[in-house]
Image: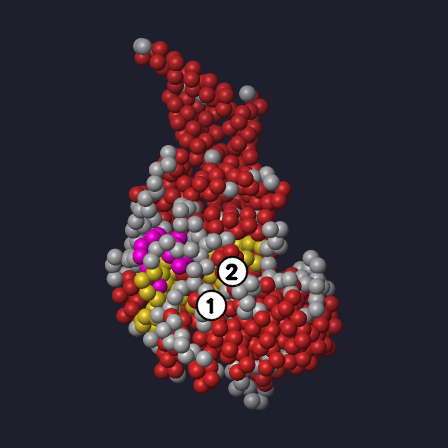
Amino acid sequence: MSWDAFVEGLRSFVLWSMDVTAVPIIIYFVLINTSLLVLIVLAFLEFRAQQRRRSTAVAWQGAGLAPGVSLLVPAYNEEAGIVMAVKSFLTLRYPRHEVVVVDDGSSDQTFARLEEAFDLVEVPRELPHEIPIRAKVLGIFVPRDGRTRLVVVRKENSGRSEAINVAINAASEPLVAMIDGDSILEPDGLLHVTRPFADDPTRMVATGGAIRPVNGSRVVSGRIVRVEMPTTWIPRIQLVEYLRAFLLGRTGWSRLGGLILISGAFGLFRRDVVVEVGGLDPNSIGEDFELVMRIHKRLRDEGRDYSIQFVPEPVSWTEVPVTAKVLRNQRRRWHRGLWETLWAYRSMLFRPRYGRIGWLALPYYWLFELMAPLLELFGIIIVPLALALGVVNVPFAILFLVLAYGYAVLVTLAAMVVDEWAFHKHDRWRAIWQTIAASVLENIGYRQATVWWRLEGWWSSLRGKKHVWGVMTRTGFDEDPA
Amino acid sequence: MIIGAALLVGATVVVLSACVLLILAVVAVRARRHSRTQRDEMLLSPLRPPLITVASGEDDDGAAAEQLTWATGVSRAVLDRNIVELLTKIRGVPAEQLVHVLEVHGAVDAAVAELSSRSTVKRARAAQLLGLARAGHTVPLLVEALGDEAVEVRNSAAYALGLIADPVAAGPVLAAIGAPERGLPAATAAEALQSMGVGISEVLRDGMADANARTRMVAAHLSGERSFTRGLPELRGLLDADPDLTVRETSATAIGRLGRGEDVGILVRHTAASEPLALRRACVIALGDLGEADAIPALAVLLGDADPRLAELAATALLAMGPDGRDALAGHEDDPAVRSARLLAGLQKASA
C-alpha cells in the first residue's frame, strides 16, 4: 500500500469516526456539562445554607449527645510519623475518643516507636470476631499509664482493609473514624463530623469530611500552623482536583441525598452498621467506595430510614503524590476500584428501591466518572489526527477545545469562589493566582496523562490482572517552625 | 454549519466570560473580607480598652461600661456584635454590665423586633442575643421561634431558651425535635434542656412516650444524665420494647446511672444472646454502673460469653463490685477477659 493510499484510508476512517460519533459526543458533552452545572448550583445552595448556619452557629463542644469515637489508624511502615500522628489524634478537641492503631506487620520500627513513646504493655485480650479476619493478631497493647485512650494491635501483614477491620473489632466506641496514619486532622474536625450524628442520632449512619492536600503547608507537632500552597505543580493541580471533588461534587451529591462515596482518608461510620455489613472488603481495590455502596444497599433493601451526609468543613489534610509515578499508581487504583465497585453493584441501577442512588448517583458515576476517560481518549487521538489530516476546520477545532477546557476551568473557578467565600484557608494573594494557573495547566498534559492512567487501571481489571499496591512515597511535613 | 459555528462561538464566549467573572468574584470576596475586618478593627479600637475593662471584671465604678453606652452609629453595631460574642464566654457581673450596655443601645428591643425579620440570619442572631441577654420576658417569642421555617432560627431559639433556663420552655423544646419537616436538631435540644433544672422531669417522662425516636432518645438520655428517677418506669419500658436500637441502648445506659436493685433483672434479661450485641454490651456496662450485688451471678455467667468484649466488660464490672464481685471471678483467672480486665484495672489504680 502506498503512503498516499494509507493517508487517504486514514482520512476516510477519521471522517467516518467523526461522523458516527459526532452526535453522541455532543450529547455526552452537553449532558456532562449540564450535570456539572447542576452539581455546581446544588453545591452553591448547600453552601449558602452552610454559610448561614455557620454565621448563626452557637458554640457546641460536644457535650450531651456527642457519641464516642474510635479513631482507626492502620499503619504500615510509618515509623517516621506515627508517634506524632497518634499524639495529635489523642489531643483532638472532643469529649470522648480513643485511638486504635493497627500495625499491619510493619517491617520497620513502627511498633517500637509507639512502644517507646507510650510505654506500651501487652494486654492478654482476645479481640471480638464481629468482622472475620484472616491474618493472625500478634498482640494488643495499651499505655502503662492506664489513662491514655490508645490501643495498639500488632498483626501479620494483610493490607489496609483488614487492618481497619481489626481496628473495628478492637474499637469500643459507637462511632468509628477511618483515617490514614499520615493524615492531619483539624483540632475541631471530630466536632464537625460528629455533629450530624448528635443532631440526628437515630438515622445518621455515616459522614464524610472534606480532605485537603497538606503539601507545602507548615506542620508543627501534628498540627497545621500555616496553610501554604504546594511548591510544585503536580500537587498544586491535585489541590484543584480536591477543591472540585469535595466542594462541588460531594457537597452537591450530599444535598441531593445521593452521596455514595466517602473518602478512605477520612470517613466516620456507626460501628454497629459497619459490623452489620461485614466491614471493609479486603479484596476490593476501592474499599471505601465499596463499603458505602454496601451500606446503602443493605439499608435500602431492608427499607430502613437512614442518612449519609457530607461535611464540607476541612477536616483532614493529607499528603498527595508529588511524582508522576506515584500519581499514576494512585489513579490506576482509583479507577480500577471505581469500575469494580460499579460493576459489583450494577444491580442497583434504575431500581426504584434504591431511589436517587439507583436513578441518579450510579448512572452519573457510570457515565461521567467511569466512561469519561474513554471518550476523552478518543478525543485526544482523533482531534490531532483530524487536524494533521486536514479533515476538520482548524479554527472550529480550536474553538471547541477552548470551550471544552474552558468549561473545566470554569468548574474549578466555581469551587474556588466557594472556598474563598466559606473557608478562605489560604491567606496569600499569590495562592489565588497559583490556583488559577493550576486550573489552566491541569488541561495541558496532566489531564491527558490521568486519562491514560485511569484507563490502564480499568484495563488491568478487565484482564483480571492482580493489583499490586505501590508505595506512596511520602516526603514528610515541614516540621520546622522557624 | 453556520448555526453550529455561531453556537460554538457563543458558548465559548459565555464560558470564558463566566471564567473572568468568577476570577473577579474570588478577588472581590477576599477584598471585601479584608476591608470589613480592617473597618471593624478601626471602629472598635477606641472602644476596646473599656470593653476589656468590663469583660475582665475590673470596672468597679461602672465608668468603662458607661463609656461603652456612648457608642453610636456603625461603631455601636460593631461593638454590639463584639459584646454578643463576649457574652458567650463570660458570666456574672461583667456579663450583666455588658447586657446593660446592649439594653441602653436598644439592641435587646431591636432583637425582639428582628425575630420577625425576613432575613434568616437576623432572626437567628436576634434569638441568640435574647438568650445571651437572659431576656426572660421573651420566652414566649422564642418558643414560637422553635417552629421557624429555618433550622438556624430553631437552633438559635433553643440555644437562647437553654440560656434563659426557664423550665416552662422544656416541653416545647422537646416537642420541637420531632416536628415534621421542621425538626429541632437533637444535640441543640439536649443542651438546652440540660440547663433547665429539675423542673423538667415530667416533661422528659412524657417525651419518652413520644412517637419520634429522636425525642425518646433525648428524653431517655437526659433522664439518665440528670438522674431523674421518676422516669425509671418509662426507661424500663423503652429498654424492653422500643423499636429503635439506639433508644434501647440509651435507656440501658440511663438505667445504669439511676436505676435500683430491682433493675438488675431487666438489664440481665437484655444481656441474653438473642439480643443485639451492642445492646447486650450496653446492659453489661449498665450493670457495672449500677453496682448491685444481685447482678454478680449473671455477670459471672457472662464471663464465658462467646463475645470476648462482653466477657471483659463483665469482668470489669465484677472487679468494681468489691470482694463479692472479685470472688465471682474464681475459676476464670486464666480467661483472657479476666486477665485483661485485671491488668487494666491495675494500671488505672496505679496511675490514680
Give residue B287's position: percent from left, percent from top. Answer: 53, 76
**Image position of A429 with respect to B287: above or below:** above
Residue B255: in magenta span: no
Q: Is circle 2 on the same chain as circle 1? A: no
Labelled pair 2, 1 in contact (Cβ < 8 Å)? no
Farthest residue, direction left: A108
Q: Residue furthest front?
A: B331
Query: Chain letter of disc 2?
Result: A
**Residue at (29, 69) in percent of width and height:** A115
Point out the frontmost of discs 2 and 1.
Answer: 1
Residue A159 lies in magenta, yes or no? yes
Q: Return the residue nearer the eye: A231 or B179.
A: B179
Residue type pointed to by label 2: Asp
Q: Quadrant of residue B223?
A: bottom right
Number of numbered discs: 2
Choose between B44 and B119: the one closer to the eye: B119
Which residues, given as a range, are shown in magenta?
A153-166
Q: Disc 1 is attached to a residue of which chain?
A: B
* Residue at mark 2: A272
Alpha carbons under labels 2 and 1: distance apart:
19 Å
The residue to which callout 1 is attached is: B305
